Amino acid sequence: MESRQDPADDAAVVLESRDEPERFAELYDRYAPDIHRYVARRLGDWLADDVTAETFLVAFRRRHRFDPARGSVRPWLYGIASNLVAGHRRSEVMQYRVLAKTAIDPVVVDYHDSTDSRIAAAAVARQLAGALAHLPKGDRDVLLLIAWEALSYDEVAQALGIPIGTVRSRLNRARKKARKALGGIDPTTACEEFTHG
């Protein structure tokens, strides 16, 4: 799911791209599939291409402001993508409401091999999508970055520009609300099952 790269390499590529802009393409090649998948899950395929491209365009334009001490660009890119997703909040909530009714996720369906796994995922998907639709944006961002993208608390804090304590409190609040909607199932586990079937 996550691209495994040396964070120092990420920082070096960003620094070198300041003088050699074509180097930034390496970061696109490395992280675009993960960002695209994340955005597609949140907004659907019809917006994922545009938002992914915009994420990298924003990052490219802001590369001179990237602090190499941050290391990996992964949280930075997820933060940009999450902010762009926020601009499409109505589409995201509508996506979850449709998913809650139909239990069909176009991102996940392609990855399921058996009918049994699709049926099991659909049962969880409806409840999970309904719960996600009702979470506040900040809580939803934290939950999905941790559950879907396997970012650490520190990476989520960097991505969203919030203190790590806020990450913990938002995740705790999101888990409680989603767990209630899921009949006691931990939403981070449900998100993983929903994602991987």
Image (tube, rainbow, N blue to C red):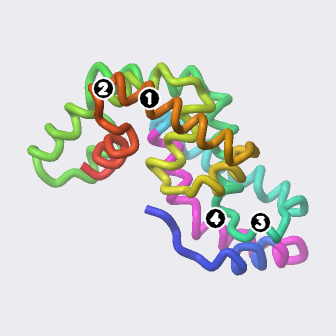
Residue ID for mark 3: 70
The overriding secondary structure of the stretch rendered in magenta is helix
Mark in the foreground, 3 or 4: 3
Graded by Cα atoms within 10 Å as few (under 14), some (14 to 19) or many (20 or more), the crowding at tag 3 reads some
The numbered mark, 1 or 3, whose residue comes first in the sequence reads 3
- Front residue of this view, candidates 14 and 21: 14
What stretch of residues is rendered in magenta?
15-41
Element type where label 3 sits in the image: helix
As drawn, 23 above or below 55: below
Are the residues tagged 4 and 2 within 8 Å (C-beta)?
A: no
As drawn, 14 above or below 104: below
Residue 166 is situated, as x and y percent measured from the top left of the image, at: 67, 39
Q: What residue is shown at x 55% (from left), y 56% (from top)?
A: 151
- Front residue of this view, candidates 148 and 181: 181
Q: What residue is shown at x 63% (from left), y 79% (from top)?
A: 6
C-alpha distance separating marks 4 and 1: 36 Å
Q: Is residue 54 visible?
A: no
